[in-house]
Amino acid sequence: MASDATHAAMSLHDHLPLLQVVVPMLAAPVCGIIGSRRLSWPLAFAASLTASIISVFLLLDTLDGSIISYHIGGWAPPLGIEYRIDAANAFVLFLVSIISSVVLLYARTYVGEVISASKHVLFYACYLLCLSGLLGVAATGDAFNTFVFLEISSLSTYVLIALGAERDKRALTSAFDYLVMGTIGATFFVIGIGFLYMATGTLNMVDISERIADMPDNRTVRAAFAFIVVGMGLKVAIYPLHLWLPGAYTHAPSVVTAFLAATSTKVAVYVLLRFMFSVFQPGFVFETYTLEFIILPFAILAMFAASIVAAFQTNLKRLLAYSSIAQIGYMLLGISMISKTGLTATVIHLFNHGITKGTLFMAVGAYVLQTGNSFFDRLEGLGKSMPWTSAAFVVGGLSLIGVPGTAGFISKWVLVQAALEKGWWVVALLIVASSLLAVIYVWKAVEVLYMRELPEGSTHVEAPLSLLVPMWMLAIASIYFGIDTSLTLSAAQTAAENLFLGL
């Protein structure tokens, strides 16, 4: 009996890469078929929590540099679809699933306040589809499968953003803009994959990498690289391909924005990393030139231009949306350095920015519930009437700036180290200078919250515990991972080593 139980447990552990994606994917249609408002949240939360637990096991299994290869249906690659888990995507799976579970704790109260009861089931079904799509993008080792999961997550995201139309009709326009831009990006991406298939006859990423290693001057391969970079550039919101992001983040329900800002663009950055370093590899001259002469200048431009635009915003959600574009610039800067330390900075910032932005948008969501919107003239003095919410916002703001003792500082410190390693002291100074711009727009929000008086007759009260608890879970994580970096830094370093070796 004991040996049978052990065998069963081992078999279940062997299937964890598949279960990571399948559990929320199956929960989505079940949620819709049952159609129960009361059961939809418990079902969504159970599926997300299961994915979170699985992601912890996968991350622990890959921290030593191991790679898990799971063959769907027992069909070995390159003919079959492979789920390939290493430290890089295990770290992304961990971020996405943990953020999802925390946001769902927040959603239990929030969704009831901002979305009509008749659409609750739709919300949770689309949320689970978005989650399973993002997890699938990170887990798969098949290029076309990546496109399929991208579309699953994108289509559900359009619906989630449009649900904000109950309070703000501009959410429909924002969802449509994102749909158009997202469709163009997906089309470019799948054309790139098609070119790779023409050149290699395979869709498995490892197999593609091996076959194009001897084709550095092949025009089809070069065209594939260009289409994939531009396509994913739209999904990542690389400056100047970012025009869909401010509207989507501003007009979507804050619970949706908190989830997307912490996960969606991070998964897209991971896809860029995977294709640039595992599939094409930095040995290709055309890739090196693209990173140094296109991605690098646009990354630096994003760091400054988006931060300056953020400083002039009068809407707090829109301010944080432009801040996200600037932070994406830091991630792209790390990629463009083509070094292990640079990749480490990108991977760790991907995680740290995720928990930071989750905190900030949850705090803004609590403000919106009290005031009806996130314009600064409606937020005056809320630091006094909503002290716990505002304190969480300040913690997130400090991490966004990169103040020592917060997760954001670790990211920027490693990025500065990477720049100095390459002798790019000017770039290191630019990183510090752009962080000072973050001080301006974060201080602008703090001034409104704490240094202005509450309007006469104000009835604003502190957010309920059901919103404060998940908000502070991420706020505390922003502090904890700024002090103890044993998990995040080791995972990021292992991921960077694997990526740099083209694994």
Image: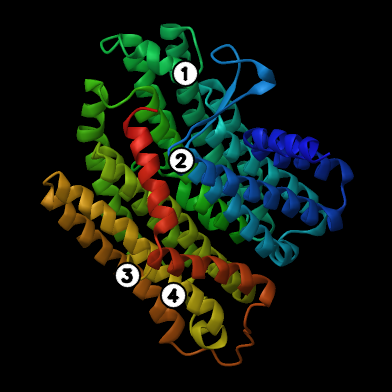
Residue 326, position as x, y percentages in the image: 34, 53
> Quadrant of residue 321 in the image?
bottom left
Label 2 SS: helix
| For marks 4 and 1 on the same chain, the one whose residue lies earlier in the sequence | 1
| For marks 3 and 4 on the same chain, the one whose residue lies earlier in the sequence | 4
Residue placed under numbered mark 1 in the picture:
193
What label does residue 87 carry, if any?
Answer: 2
Residue placed under numbered mark 4 in the picture:
394
**Three-letter amino acid code at the position of disc 3:** Val
* x 55%, y 81%: residue: 388
**Three-letter amino acid code at the position of disc 2:** Ala
| For marks 1 and 3 on the same chain, the one whose residue lies earlier in the sequence | 1
Please state if 345 lies on the left or on the right of 355 as rendered: left
For the view shown, which residue lies furthest in the front direction?
2
Residue 359, position as x, y percentages in the image: 51, 65
Q: CA distance from mark 4 to mark 2?
A: 31 Å
